[in-house]
Image (spheres, rainbow, N blue to C red):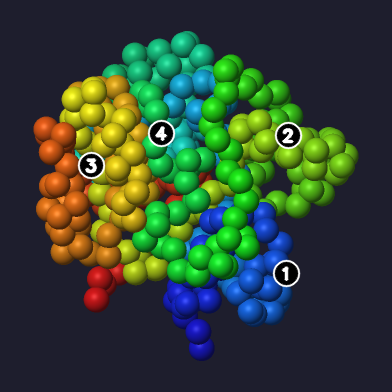
Amino acid sequence: MVDSNSVDDVDRQIVHALALDGRASFSKIAEVLGVSDQTVARRYRRLRTSGLARVVGLRNPVRVEGVRWWLRLQCAPGAAPGIAEALARRPDTSWIQLVSGGTEILCAARADTPADRDALLLDRLPRTGRITSVTAHSMLHMYFGGPMSDGLPQIFAVLTPEQAAALAVPRPTGEGDEPITLGPLDEKVFDVLGVDGRAGHAELAAATGWSESTVRRRLEQLYEMGALFYDIDVDSPSFGFHTEAWLWMSVPPQELAAVGAELATHPEVAFVAATTGPTNLAASVVCRDSTALYRYLTERIGRLNAISRMETAPIIRTVKQAGAILPIRPARSAA
């Protein structure tokens, strides 16, 4: 009997394919991989129902109106898991992780208006007695991750260049003069796509009251204007990557763009952005184990002389990812 949580080479190829085009038809993926349509459909259903991988459709934070905040919350011992779970139930949070030995929470929150920002940062969080400090970082520029990548760190890539070229589609650029304001029915579209980025036009039509042809046109418009992008969430340990960490770095302003662009080329990097706050560059990295993380820090990061100071915060557990609350998984051996 096949372990529902086991991942093989075909699964890895399917995940890479969906990272390149989250709504590619199973028949197109099957043709490129040289397997049957049924195999691709069956494998993806298993990956999704097991929580190992899922395609999601998300707002592009660079183009959609509103501000994205990264919040670092220091908590009293033992308080962080409960606070993280409470934050995960909020609709304005999209990414929550326990880091630094489980006493710190990293939370991505969206503030659509100044009032939303003030209510969260100046009222609700400071009144939570077991939160001992709050540091807020506003994302200024994204170098890699989300709409600025092919959906996965390069370390996950397994397709040949020819296969990748056959599946790749243009990604939203994230550029534009004015932020995009979404309508109420657009929000319903994102609610559905945030759970299942491959949701059919009929399901989206039922959620919005639009016709299927209107849904199809609106999806194309949102994508082309850069408001919508498709991403793929993966359970990294199931794919052989057992160590994840956040790097908080200080870089002279004149070197910031060059260092951010350099980090964006590193296969281990899942996300890198310029931010406000005590440090001005944040990166999330994925490695096979702690030894690989050590090599990355000493051999790759260590060569970047412009980084004057760095804090490494290991990720203990991801509580919420791309808007979905994740189940607690048993610890896995890194062997």
Label 3 belongs to which residue?
A: 247
Q: How packed is label 4: few (under 14 Cα within 10 Å), some, or many (20 or more)?
A: many
Decide which of 195, 164 is in the foreground and name it: 164
What amino acid type should be assigned to the residue bearing mark 2? Gln
- Does the residue at mark 1 contact the one at mark 4 (Cβ under 8 Å)? no
User: Do tag 4 and tag 2 residues touch (Cβ < 8 Å)?
Assistant: no
* Separation of residues labelled 1 and 2 (CA atoms): 25 Å
Q: Distance between the residues labelled 3 and 4?
A: 15 Å
Q: Is mark 4 on a helix, strand or loop?
A: strand
Circle 3 residues within 10 Å: few <14, some 14–19, many ≥20: some
Q: Is residue 133 above or below residue 303?
A: above
For badge 4, the amino acid type reads: Met
Q: Name the residue under label 1.
A: 27
Can residue 101 be seen here? The reply is no
Instruction: Give the numbered dot on residue 221.
Output: 2
| Residue at point 35%, 18% (across, down) | 121
Vertical arrangement, residue 63 with respect to residue 332, above or below: above
Residue plotted at (59% across, 55% down): 168
Residue at image mark 4: 142
Say above or below: 152 vs 109. Answer: below
- Give 203 or 61, whichever is nearer the viewer: 61
Label 2 SS: helix
| Dot 1 or dot 2, earlier in sequence | 1
User: Which three-letter amino acid code belongs to the residue tagged 3?
Assistant: Leu
